[in-house]
Structure formats: C-alpha cells, structure tokens
Image: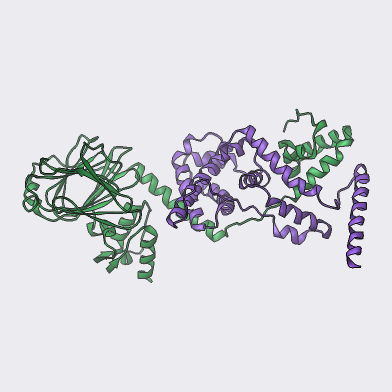
Amino acid sequence: MEYSKDYSSYTTNDFIADDAFLQWVRSPDTASDAWWQTWLTAHPHKQQQVDEARAFIIQLQFAEQLPDQDAVNASLAHSLLRIEAAERAAVPEVKQRPVRKLYWWAAAAALIAGIMITVKYLLPASPEMIKISGYAQGVRTVKLPDNSMVRLNAGAALSYRKDWTSATNREIWLQGEAFFDIKPSATAMRAAKGFVVHSGNALIDVLGTSFNVREGGAFTTVTLNTGKIRLSFNDLPDNPFILNPGDFVQYQTTSNKIIRKKVNPALYAVWKEERQYLEKITLQELAWYIEDTYNYRVKITDEQLAAQQLSGSLQVRDETSLLETLSLHSS
Amino acid sequence: MQHIDPAVWEACKAGDKGAYAAIYRLYYPRLYNYGYKLTDNVVLIEDSIQEIFVRFWINREQLNAIREFRSYLFVSFRHCLLRLLSQHRQQQGDLPDEEQYVFALEMSAEQQRLAKEEEHEQLRTLRSAMDHLTPRQREAIFFRFYENMDYDEIAAILQISVKATYKLMARAIEVLRSAYHTMPLVPALMTLATLATALGSLQLSMAIMDTGIIYKC
C-alpha cells in the first residue's frame, strides 16, 4: 500500500472513505501498523478522527445470508454438469450425411409427420405479410389459410404471405417454437404446392406433414416424427438433409456443425399438448430429450433403470415442471 | 475476505475443473449473500449464479486478471439477476419497472447481541440510519465495507464513473455518520482531546434528564 496522500487535513469521513485506511483497519499488518503509528505521532491532533473512523468501520457489520454446505455442493455439482454440456456443445460429434439422393421422398409427402426445429431468427419477409404472435404463456392454436393447423409455443411468432393462391409454395417464416399439422397439397388449397418453412438459416421442405418448430440458444434442431422432409441450411455446403421418422438433426450456428442421430420423436413435440400422452418411453430416451432441449448432462448409471419404460400423460411447460413430474413418477 | 490463489486461477483458466470447483465454492456464498439483498427469491439467485458461471467457463480465457474477475462476476451476476427479477415481476403481473430495485442491507443481529451495553444505542442508531440510505447507497456501502472493494471495482459493478462512486460513497458515509452527531451522548473511544466535547454532551444529557423529571411531576 502506498501512502502518497497528505492526510493532515482529513476529516473522520475522509478517513472512512480512504482505501489505504480501510485496508489498515480491516487487515492490518506490521507495515501498515508502523506507518499509521508514525503518522499519528507526527499528527497527534488527528488521533480523534482516526479513532472515530476506525470505530465506525469496525461497527459496520452486516447480516449475512449464507447458503449451507449442502446447497453449495449441490449447486457446484449442477454447474459442473452444465459446463461439461457446454463443452460438448462446443465440439459436437460431426456426422456427414451420405451422398445426396434424389427426391424419392416426395412420394411419401402425404404422410403426417412431426418435426421440431430450433431456429435463430426470423427471415425478412416480403410485403403483404400476415404476422401472428404466440401468447406470452401457454400454447396458441392458429389455422392457416389452407386449413393447416399451427400450435405456437409461448413467445413464438410466424408470418406468411397474405395471398396463398398466387404463391407457388406455401411459405412460412418462423421465429420460436411451433408445431405444424400441414394438410397435403392435394386436399389443401388449390394452387399451392409444397410447404416450406424458413427459420433462421434453415429451410424445411414439407409436403403434407405435421411438424414442430422452436427457437432457443445457438442451435437449430429438427426432429421428424413421421413422414419425410428435406432440410437445408444456408451456410452448409452439404445440403439438403433427408430426414426419416425419428431423425434428429441439430445444427450449431456458431461452429457450423451438424449432429445427426435417432431419437424418440414423440418426446420432442411433447410440449404442444396441455397433457401429452406418451407410450413406453424409456428413462434413457427422456434423459436424451432433457440433454438436447435444456442443455443438461444427464447420466443414468443403472442400466436397468435407464431401460425402464414409462407410459402416461406428461405436461411440459418448462424444465422445472418436467423434472417435477418425473420425480413424482419415479417415486 | 478470502481471495483466489493465483495458482488456482491460472489452473482454472487452463481448464482444470478442480480449480473451477474451488473458485465456485469461494464465490457461490458471496454471490448468494449479495443476491439475497436484491431479492429473497432463491430460485432466481441460483439460476443467475449457474448462468454466469457457465458463461465464465466458456469465456475464461478472455479474462486477464483475478481483480478483473471479481468485478466481472458481480457485474454479470447483478445484471442477470435484475433481468430475471424484472421478467419474474412481469409474469406475476406487476407493473414492469426496470429501475425498481431494493437493497436490503441490514446490520448484523449477532453483533448487537454481543455488543457491550454502552454500544447498544450506537448500533441501534446506525441500524436506523441505514434505512435513510437509498438502495444504491446501501449497495455501494455493501461492496465497500463488506466486500472491501476499491472504488474502481465498485464503479464497474454499479456501472457508474469512479468519480460518481466517490461521491455516492461520501454521501452514504455522511448520512450514516450524521446519525452519530444527533446522539445525546457519544460513548467510548474518547481521547483526551475530545474530553471537552464529551463534557458538553454530558451537560446536554443532564438537561434532558431534567426535562424527564419535570414530566414525571
């Protein structure tokens, strides 16, 4: 600590406010003790101010609200899982898609499918757009001009051209999470052919399907329930991806990398119903879902437990309600 | 106040999870204690701590000094918690008010219990003087006299200039200290130089006692 200041004109309040003085009162050592003793000997008229300032600082003791050791340990354990998950996300396992196939999937277009994608932002939309925003809380059901149904999750928004008859494709720009139940073009409105969802840098081609879209973080995630879709990313050369039922594709925007795997797709669209009935979901599948959606690392050490199947209705508003429901079921 | 060992800091930056755990254990209680003065919603406090530590881990290589780290933690924690609080209030249907914040800084009750009798009055005065500070002044006092931070660090956390921090602190100290001046008897820690003043106070207190007697009659 340096003592370059001239303390001779300091008031009690000045001493209280001084860095070196505070340090001396709070953590005195031989050096600071010696310095202040010497200074006081030279300036005896300041003894009163120094004493008052010392007494004041010593008296300032505040009530503490400290967590107990168990709480610290639990929080730390949770944090370690999260940073591991963050590291995994930063260096994802990359699987390249096989050589591009022709559009054989178009034949299956009339099938009902469900996909879930996570998007980054809404693309700029052309004029004469209709924009529909979801509720702040809860699920909003929207009917599109071709009678397709959309469920918007909290905070999501979609827009589309006002006039669908003149468009070659039915196009949706989406921000946030939504589940689409798209009518096949044959039974839908006249002119429109395909159904395209733009979401951030992803483009999803669907022809008669039901699917689900969600925004959050740095990921774009698409999970297909049934049917087939074609998925393209603006920034990836290796496009498009053909998704089969149960396929999960996650695209990380920052690192431009892709994870592809098989999942139980019913789980990934579970939020769309007030209470979604799920059949024979294993705990392991649930664990993967929690990992992929909420960025936790979930480890089930007991293999038998991991393979245990659950059936029943599940309500998922957020991770807290999901974990609460799970803890009820397992106990 | 305990500080991070520089060796632990370097290890953590290099990716050592044990070192990370040591830092977490050191700062979790301190952030919790601080957060509790902004809200008693421990879920939001926990969420904020989780959030900022993950961010710290991801960005740890960009932080240069330990000193920088301390204010970094408090700045990001404060920001995160106030944002969550604001969202929470809106969800509860309260009027959205970004600026609305409290800082419940209270004097230690334990200290009052252990204090000598002659100090009781003084502590009580200090306690009530604390209520006369603005939330921001209380927060500055907390960082100064609980966390023992210097003005640069406090300025960084409160997002104001160092000069403004000096002024804020001086004003807060003045309010707290002015409570003393209004006390009838300044007890203890008297030196010879202050004896004359003390005698003056004594006469004043006797005068007050006299008034009391008159009331009794």
Q: Position of residue B105 (x, y in %)?
A: 64, 52
Q: Residue at the spot x=47%, y=47% of the render? A: B83
Q: Position of residue A68 (x, y in %)?
A: 58, 60
The reply to whether residue B182 is in sight is: yes
**Which is more toward the observer, A178 or A293?**
A178
A6 versus A29 height, above or below = above
Which chain is represented by purple in the image?
B
Q: Residue at the spot x=17%, y=40% of the render? A: A240
Image label count: 0
Which quadrant does the C terminus of chain A fall into? bottom left
**Which is more toward the observer, B29 or B35?**
B35
**Which is more toward the observer, B137 or A211?**
B137
Q: Residue at the spot x=53%, y=40% of the render? A: B72
Which quadrant does the N terminus of chain A fall into? top right
Question: Residue B74: which quarter of the image?
Answer: top right
In this rendering, position of residue A260 left or right of residue A89 = left
The colour one sees for chain A in the rendered image is: green
Q: Position of residue A319 (x, y in %)?
A: 37, 58
In this rendering, position of residue A303 left or right of residue A130 = right
